[in-house]
């Protein structure tokens, strides 16, 4: 009789358990796909359900933590990523997640330690090389960032973010002289041209992103400035506009209003100060058209600076009485007390 009861229970319970885990697997796979596409809010909704049903699913916990991180829910991200390490202490993925987390809090030393641990566990993990590249980039070693992005791409040619990192390393190299991907002075414009190629590849692999419009605008600016500096008379970055200034009957442009950018919550939490330098085209119609970040701070400040620069009001430069476009560098500084 008792055996019969057990059989009856199993008949009803086992299908339920099987259905629940099948549902969790579906939620996990769909959630991971949404995370990879950049739909982090959608990913969180599904992955939370998946981890409730199967709390030992380290993969679901990792992508849940990463999605929390991308939506600035750092406490939730930390909990999820620590769960990954607890479930799989010998797997690199959890340490990669922790490195992202520490980097988002501007804790460079801790991020380096976690990234190094991830590489020790799996040197063939492309994301481990990528996160090391991000740390190099944050430290101003653009050549180091470029090389790590290259390694990540060699392992996974479809790793979209690695192409973005390469593009940014090349662009920032063009705007500075330290820690850069080097070219001879007459070939510096190739940094921008190669940056264009990598940005195009990044966007071709990006199926969904909340900031895709912003990145598309960045590509258009890259193309403009690459073409601009391909002309010999415009190739010296630190003497922008000199050729025009030397011309007869030239009157330089005049900024009449320069809005201040907002200071982001994440930058304030990280205690971030510094300068963002932009390359800007001040067009003949009195509008700012193309903007490129040559030196940035991250934590949303670059985007805020671009938004502020787009609102600059100015009187166009003129030559022989006619308005003309000029390219100039401008800076915005952030101080926190």
Image: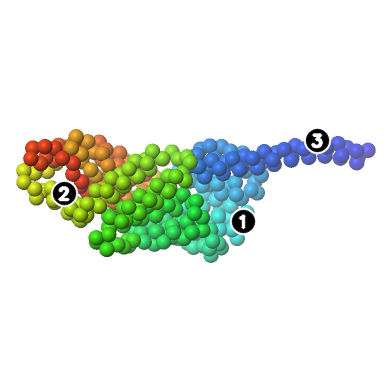
Q: Position of residue 16 (x, y in %)?
A: 75, 37
The residue beneath circle 2 is 241
How many angstroms separate mark 3 from mark 2 (CA)?
79 Å
* Secondary-structure class at tag 2: loop
Q: Nearer the viewer, residue 34 or 3?
A: 34
The residue that mark 1 highlights is 88
Tag nearer the camera, 1 or 2 = 2
Mark found first going from the N terminus, 1 or 2: 1
Residue 18 in view, yes or no: yes
| Residue depicted at x 88% and y 37% | 5
65 left or right of 55 in image: left
Q: Secondary structure at mark 3?
A: helix
Choose between 82 and 302: the one closer to the eye.
302
Q: Quadrant of the N terminus?
A: top right
* x and y percentages locating residue 193 in the rendered image: 32, 52
Q: Residue at x 39, y 59 (%)?
A: 146
Nearer-N-terminus badge (3/2): 3
The residue beneath circle 3 is 12
Q: Secondary structure at mark 1?
A: loop
Q: Residues within 10 Å of mark 2 (few under 14, many from 20)?
A: some
How busy is the neighbourhood of tag 3: few (under 14 within 10 Å), some, or many (20 plus)? few
Q: Residue furthest bottom?
A: 120
Give residue 138's position: percent from left, percent from top: 37, 56
Residue 284, above or below 337: above
């Amino acid at each position: 009789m008792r055996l019969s009861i057990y059989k009856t229970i199993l008949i009803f319970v086992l299908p339920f358990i099987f259905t629940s885990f099948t549902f969790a697997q579906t939620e996990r796979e769909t959630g991971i796909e949404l995370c990879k596409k950049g739909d982090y809010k959608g990913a969180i909704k599904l992955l939370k359900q998946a981890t409730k049903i199967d709390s030992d699913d380290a993969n679901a916990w990792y992508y849940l933590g990463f999605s929390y991180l991308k939506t600035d829910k750092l406490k939730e991200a930390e909990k999820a990523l620590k769960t990954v390490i607890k479930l799989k202490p010998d797997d690199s993925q959890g340490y990669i997640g922790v490195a992202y987390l520490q980097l988002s809090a501007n804790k460079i030393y801790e991020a380096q330690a976690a990234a190094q641990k991830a590489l020790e566990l799996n040197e063939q993990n492309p994301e481990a090389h990528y996160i090391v590249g991000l740390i190099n980039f944050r430290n101003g070693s653009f050549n180091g960032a470029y090389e790590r992005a290259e390694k990540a791409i060699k392992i996974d040619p479809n790793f979209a973010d690695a192409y973005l990192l390469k593009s940014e390393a090349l662009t920032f190299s063009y705007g500075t002289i330290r820690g850069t991907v080097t070219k001879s002075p007459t070939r510096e414009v190739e940094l921008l041209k190669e940056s264009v190629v990598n940005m195009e590849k990044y966007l071709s692999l990006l199926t969904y992103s909340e900031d895709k419009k912003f990145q598309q605008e960045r590509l258009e600016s890259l193309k403009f400035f690459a073409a601009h500096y391909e002309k010999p008379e415009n190739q010296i970055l630190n003497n922008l506009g000199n050729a025009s200034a030397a011309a007869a009957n030239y009157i330089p442009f005049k900024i009449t209003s320069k809005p201040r950018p907002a200071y982001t919550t994440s930058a304030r939490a990280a205690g971030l100060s510094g300068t963002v330098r932009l390359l800007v085209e001040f067009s003949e119609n009195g509008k700012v058209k193309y903007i490129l970040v040559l030196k940035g701070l991250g934590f949303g400040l670059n985007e805020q600076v671009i938004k502020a620069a787009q609102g600059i009001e100015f009187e166009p430069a003129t030559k022989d009485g006619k308005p003309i476009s000029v390219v100039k560098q401008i800076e915005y500084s952030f101080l926190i007390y």
